Image (cartoon, rainbow, N blue to C red):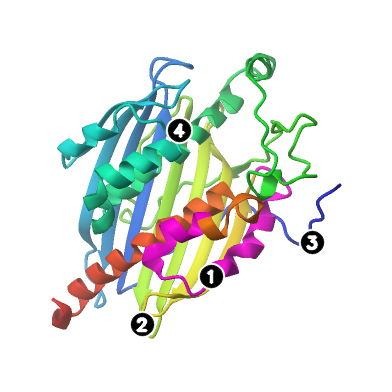
C-alpha cells in the first residue's frame, strides 16, 4: 500500500515574515525555548514567554494587556517535570512537579490549574505546551550531533511503532520504516527571524540562543468586525551550528467565527514546513471543526481529528485557538467603552 498525495498538496515553505499588526486587534505571541545548559542528555530546560498586545483602533502605541514567563526543568529521558516556576508567581504550579510531559501532564494541568484555563491566560498556553515541547525538543540533536552517533543512540532504543498515530504515519506512508518506527530524514527549511525589523513590538522579548536548542513559537492575531477573523502561525525550529534556524514544523491558520456565538464559520490550514511528504494531507480534514465553538476546541479537536485524521502539530495549532474568546473580550473592553 502506498499513500496517494494529490498533486499540489505540499508544504509551501516558511512564511516570509510576521505580518504587520492590524489596528483594532489583539496579538498573542508565545515562545518556549528548549535547551540543555549542561550538555546533551542532561536536564532539559524550558523558558517560556507569552504576551497579549493590543493595537488600538485609532493608532497610537500598542498596549501590553498581559505577559507571563515560565521556567521548567524536565528530565530528558522520562519527560517528567522536575522544577517549574512562573512570573508573575503562581504557587499552585508546584502541583505539576512529578507529572510527565504528555497526556499525563495535561490531565494534571486540567485539574490543578483549572483557574488558568478558565481565564485563558498566556501562562496556560505555555503550560499546555510542555507536553509538545518536551517531545519535540530532541529534534535539535539531529542538527548538532554527529549522524552516526545519533543513529547509534536511536537504534539502541526500543522500537516505537508509529503506524497510525497521525496522518503522516498512516499505513503505507514513506515516513515509516519497515518495523513501524519513524524515519530520520526530516525535511527542514531555513526560517527568517520572527521579529519584524520595522516593528519592535511585533513579538515579545525573544531569547538569543546560539547553542543547541529548539523553539516552539505561536502567534494568534484576532480582530472583530462583522465576523471574528483569526490569523495564526505555529512553528517548531532548531538552531544550527552555522547560525540561524531551521524549521521542522510550520503551519499558518486562518479562520472566521460568529461574533455572537463564537462558532467557527471557516478555517483553512496552510502547511508551510513539515517533515514528511504525507504530512500536509491532514490539512484537508480541518473542515470537521466547522460549527465548533472556539472555547471548546481544546476538547473537540482530539475527538474529531484523532489518529490518521489529524496531525499532532496541526491539532496543537487549532487547539490554541480555544482562548480566542478571552482575547476578544479584552479587545472589546479596551477598544469600546460601552463594553467596559
Above or below, 248 against 159 in this view is below
Q: CA distance from mark 2 to mark 3?
A: 36 Å
Instruction: Decide: is 4 above or below 192.
Output: below
* Disc 4, SS: helix
Q: Which label's residue is closer to the chain start, 1 or 4?
A: 4
Q: Is residue 39 left or right of residue 29?
A: right
Q: Which residue is mark 4?
A: 134
**What mark, if any, has residue 267 been given in the picture?**
1
The mark that comes first in sequence, 2 or 3, is 3
Residue at which label 2 appears: 225
User: Is 293 one of the magenta-colored residues?
Assistant: yes
- Expressed as whole percent of the image width and height from the top left, the position of residue 253 reads 52, 63
**Which of pointers 3 and 4 lies earlier in the amino acid sequence?**
3
Q: Are marks 3 and 4 in contact (CB under 8 Å)?
A: no
Residue at horizontal 17 percent and vertical 40 percent from the top: 90
Q: Which residue is mark 3?
A: 6
Q: Earlier in the sequence, mark 2 or mark 4?
A: 4
Q: CA distance from mark 1 to mark 2?
A: 17 Å
Please tell me which residue is depicted at 29% across the width and 51% down the height of the picture. 122
Alpha carbon separation for disc pair 2 and 4: 38 Å
Image marks 1 and 3: residues in contact by CB distance under 8 Å = no
Residue 188 or residue 241, whichever sits in front:
188
Is residue 193 covered in magenta?
A: no
Tell me the mark number nearer the camera, choosing from 2 and 3: 3
- Magenta-highlighted residues: 275-302
Query: Disc 1 versus disc 4: distance between alpha carbons?
Result: 28 Å
Amino acid at each position: 500500500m502506498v499513500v496517494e498525495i494529490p498533486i499540489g498538496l505540499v508544504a509551501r515553505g516558511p512564511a516570509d515574515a510576521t505580518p504587520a499588526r492590524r489596528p483594532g486587534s489583539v496579538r498573542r505571541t508565545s515562545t518556549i525555548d528548549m535547551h540543555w545548559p549542561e550538555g546533551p542528555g542532561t536536564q532539559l530546560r524550558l523558558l517560556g514567554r507569552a504576551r497579549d498586545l493590543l493595537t488600538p483602533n485609532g493608532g497610537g502605541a500598542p498596549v501590553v494587556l498581559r505577559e507571563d514567563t515560565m521556567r521548567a526543568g524536565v528530565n530528558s529521558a522520562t519527560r517528567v517535570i522536575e522544577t517549574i516556576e512562573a512570573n508573575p508567581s503562581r504557587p499552585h504550579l508546584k502541583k505539576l512537579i512529578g507529572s510527565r510531559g504528555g497526556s499525563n501532564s495535561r490531565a494534571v494541568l486540567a485539574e490543578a490549574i483549572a483557574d488558568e484555563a478558565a481565564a485563558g491566560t498566556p501562562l496556560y498556553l505555555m503550560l499546555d505546551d510542555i507536553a509538545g515541547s518536551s517531545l519535540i525538543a530532541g529534534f535539535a540533536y539531529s542538527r548538532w550531533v554527529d549522524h552516526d552517533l545519533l543513529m547509534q543512540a536511536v537504534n539502541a532504543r526500543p522500537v516505537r511503532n508509529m503506524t497510525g498515530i497521525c496522518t503522516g504515519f498512516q499505513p503505507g506512508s514513506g515516513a515509516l520504516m519497515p518495523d513501524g518506527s519513524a524515519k530520520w530524514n526530516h525535511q527542514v527549511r531555513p526560517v527568517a527571524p520572527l521579529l519584524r525589523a520595522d516593528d519592535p513590538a511585533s513579538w515579545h522579548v525573544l531569547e538569543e540562543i546560539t547553542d543547541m536548542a529548539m523553539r516552539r513559537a505561536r502567534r494568534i492575531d484576532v480582530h472583530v468586525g462583522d465576523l471574528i477573523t483569526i490569523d495564526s502561525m505555529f512553528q517548531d525550529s532548531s538552531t544550527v551550528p552555522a547560525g540561524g534556524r531551521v524549521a521542522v514544523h510550520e503551519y499558518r491558520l486562518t479562520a472566521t467565527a460568529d461574533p455572537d456565538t463564537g462558532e467557527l464559520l471557516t478555517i483553512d490550514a496552510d502547511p508551510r514546513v513539515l517533515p514528511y511528504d504525507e504530512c500536509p494531507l491532514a490539512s484537508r480534514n480541518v473542515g470537521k471543526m466547522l460549527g465548533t465553538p472556539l472555547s471548546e476546541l481544546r476538547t473537540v479537536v482530539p475527538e474529531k481529528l484523532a489518529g490518521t485524521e489529524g496531525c499532532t502539530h496541526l491539532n496543537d495549532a487549532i487547539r490554541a485557538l480555544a482562548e480566542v474568546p478571552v482575547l476578544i473580550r479584552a479587545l472589546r473592553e479596551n477598544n469600546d467603552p460601552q463594553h467596559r
